[in-house]
Image (spheres, rainbow, N blue to C red):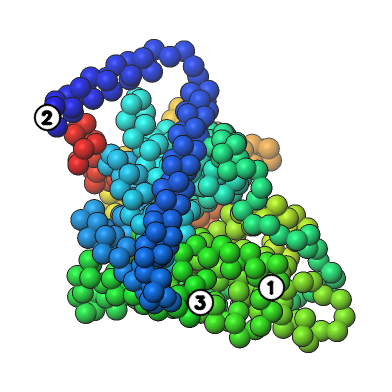
């Protein structure tokens, strides 16, 4: 059967499913919750399949090939990642930039700029690339890939229904939440990961479907993987509130280490780009470097969960070893992902944070004679601190550590450390480890929107020029009547010569009515100290003015004469212009045919 024939059959199936969905009597909210359940089941299936694939590849490399290479041990730890790199390098080079790294920046970009659209079957390619990278010894995590896989499957499902952009983006977030929730047995963490990191903004209408998807996926994951948390942690508790300043210091250290990790990763990327090394080759050298580090300590390879567990148990009491493991993991992860490998940064962040926290806890044990919390507890808190620092997502960090360890007793120091780490890391570097990758492509996301696009649009592109004005000498009663006739929320005061005198708003008129001042000229009621915008300003500048001064509209005036009004711009005008620009920028995606599934 030809590719064209398959595409035609699939088009007919899609049309039939869309017709059936359109006839559904369910409300919008009920439909979205039902979609959340379906995506939760699919996300759990993807998580189970991905973990099985990863374990199979690990067994193939470290058991089967490892036994065959045993005569050259421990140097077989160099050979195994190189063999994996010889497969992954060409695969990633062929598939494109979205196949390398964690995949989370690509999810953020797709959610913000393409309403959750991804080309078909990308989940399959991402699963292969990431499983081969991690399974052959590459230092990376599985949370980014499984989030990408879940979101990609949800994007494929969205093609079957008559969905608008809002619902498509919501389904996209449900898929990411389902993947993470099933993988780590952490429904809240999965939901917050999707909302706080992938979407960048969330509200009541998005929360319920995403949480339902995460809960359903986590329930299936618990049935398959068991209900035990990812890490077995002793029953730690805070020994004294006097230790809280030490945990605050740990937050500052976590911020520094998190920024170091981010800088190291992108420095490796820049190094390869500077020397223009072909992508299939650069990962072979990176994998060889990871293998050499593995010869020193195998814990810096792969996920590193065994080493994390040992640190949480307090079984690594030597400060120098903890510090070297921390630096070794930073370097090995930078070599893996910076050279083009496929995998996430969550597990490496936990590893680095555990080593940092274990170091601080061990120092406390050796220097403080009074009661103190175990070094393992410091390692637990450090895990959340470093992840918060690199992701700039403190809520996700706190809930993730709480759920993957099942330990609530350390919640106070965990919240303190994660909060301080996020604030300090944001002060040092405004972009997270995810956003920096997008920023290097010219995409600057804030609250789920591309600020780069807002910087390309000018106020003149969005302002309203057909103004409804009122003369300064008209009465407040006339202004109220004009308010009722137009349903506007305010009017500029403009005289017969076209000069701006101020703005009167509905709130101004309501206060005047309460004080019995509506008989007076409207100029005595209006606001005269105005925030103004200029036609050649960017929409991003105008949006900042609206936000800083807590106003919903500003007059647009000429730069040479601030009393010469040329228009009005509101926050709704800015959002409308932004959305129209996105539609124009991505009209090619709207014309995508069913054959994209087989590209």
| In the foreground, 513 or 358 | 358
Label 3: element kind:
loop
x then y, percent, for residue 107 = 39, 50
Lower position in the chain sequence, tag 2 or tag 3:
2
Residue drawn 82% across the image and 75% down it? 372
Q: Is there any visible trace of residue 88 in the rendered image?
A: yes
**What's the CA distance linking mark 3 and mark 1?**
15 Å
x then y, percent, for residue 93 = 22, 60
**Mark toward the viewer: 2 or 3:** 3
- From what the image shows, is residue 513 above or below residue 504? above
Label 1: element kind:
loop
| In the foreground, 171 or 563 | 171
Left or right: 281 in relation to 486: left
- From what the image shows, is residue 361 above or below residue 511? below
x then y, percent, for residue 248 = 70, 73
Q: Which mark is residue 315?
A: 1
Q: Which mark is residue 30?
A: none
Lower position in the chain sequence, tag 3 or tag 1:
3
Image quadrant in which you'd find residue 19: top left
Left or right: 570 in relation to 581: right
């Amino acid at each position: 059967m030809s590719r064209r024939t398959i595409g035609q059959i699939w088009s007919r199936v899609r049309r039939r499913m869309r017709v059936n969905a359109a006839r559904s009597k369910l409300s919008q909210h009920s439909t979205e919750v039902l979609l959340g359940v379906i995506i939760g089941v699919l996300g759990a299936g993807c998580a189970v399949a991905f973990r099985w694939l990863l374990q199979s590849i690990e067994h193939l490399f470290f058991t089967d090939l490892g036994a065959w290479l045993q005569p050259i041990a421990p140097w077989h730890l160099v050979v195994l990642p190189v063999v994996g790199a010889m497969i992954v390098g060409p695969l990633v080079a062929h598939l494109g930039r979205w196949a390398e790294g964690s995949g989370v920046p690509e999810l953020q970009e797709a959610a913000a700029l393409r309403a959750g659209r991804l080309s078909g079957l990308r989940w399959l390619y991402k699963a292969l690339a990431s499983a081969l990278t991690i399974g052959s010894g590459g230092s990376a995590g599985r949370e980014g890939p499984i989030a990408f896989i879940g979101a990609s499957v949800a994007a494929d499902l969205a093609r079957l229904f008559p969905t608008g952009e809002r619902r498509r983006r919501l389904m996209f977030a449900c898929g990411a939440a389902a993947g993470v929730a099933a993988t780590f047995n952490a429904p809240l963490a999965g939901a917050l990961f999707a909302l706080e990191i992938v979407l960048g903004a969330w509200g009541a209408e998005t929360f319920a479907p995403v949480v339902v998807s995460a809960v359903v996926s986590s329930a299936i994951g618990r049935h398959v993987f068991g209900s035990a948390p990812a890490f077995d942690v002793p029953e730690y508790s805070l020994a004294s509130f006097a230790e809280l300043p030490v945990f605050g210091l740990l937050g500052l250290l976590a911020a520094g280490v998190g920024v170091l990790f981010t800088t190291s990763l992108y420095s490796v990327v820049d190094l390869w780009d500077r020397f223009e090394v072909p992508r299939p080759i650069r990962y072979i050298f990176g994998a060889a470097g990871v293998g050499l580090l593995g010869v020193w300590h195998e814990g810096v390879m792969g996920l590193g969960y065994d080493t994390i567990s040992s640190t949480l148990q307090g079984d690594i009491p030597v400060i120098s070893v903890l510090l070297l493991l921390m630096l070794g993991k930073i370097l090995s992860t930078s070599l893996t992902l910076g050279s083009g490998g496929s995998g996430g940064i969550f597990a490496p962040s936990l590893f680095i944070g555990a080593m940092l926290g274990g170091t601080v806890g061990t120092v406390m044990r050796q220097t403080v004679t009074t009661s103190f919390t175990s070094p393992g507890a410091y390692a637990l808190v450090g895990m959340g601190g470093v992840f918060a620092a690199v992701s700039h997502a403190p809520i996700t960090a706190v809930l993730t550590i709480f759920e993957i360890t099942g330990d609530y007793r350390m919640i106070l120091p965990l919240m303190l450390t994660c909060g301080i780490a996020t604030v300090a890391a944001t002060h040092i570097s405004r972009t997270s480890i995810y956003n920096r990758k997008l920023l290097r492509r010219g995409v600057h996301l804030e609250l789920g929107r591309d600020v780069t696009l807002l910087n390309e649009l000018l106020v003149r592109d969005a302002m309203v020029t057909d103004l409804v004005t009122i003369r300064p000498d008209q009465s407040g009663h006339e202004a109220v009547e004009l308010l009722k006739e137009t349903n506007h929320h305010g009017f500029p005061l403009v005289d017969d010569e076209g000069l701006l005198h101020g703005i009167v708003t509905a709130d101004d008129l309501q206060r005047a009515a309460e004080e019995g001042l509506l008989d007076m000229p409207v100029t005595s009621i209006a606001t005269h100290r105005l925030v103004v915008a200029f036609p050649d300003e960017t929409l991003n500048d105008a949006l900042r003015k609206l936000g800083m001064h807590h106003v919903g509209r500003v007059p647009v005036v000429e730069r040479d004469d601030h009393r010469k009004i040329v228009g009005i711009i509101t926050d709704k005008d800015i959002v409308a212009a932004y959305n129209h620009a996105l539609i124009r920028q991505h009209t090619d995606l709207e014309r995508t045919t069913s054959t994209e599934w087989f590209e």
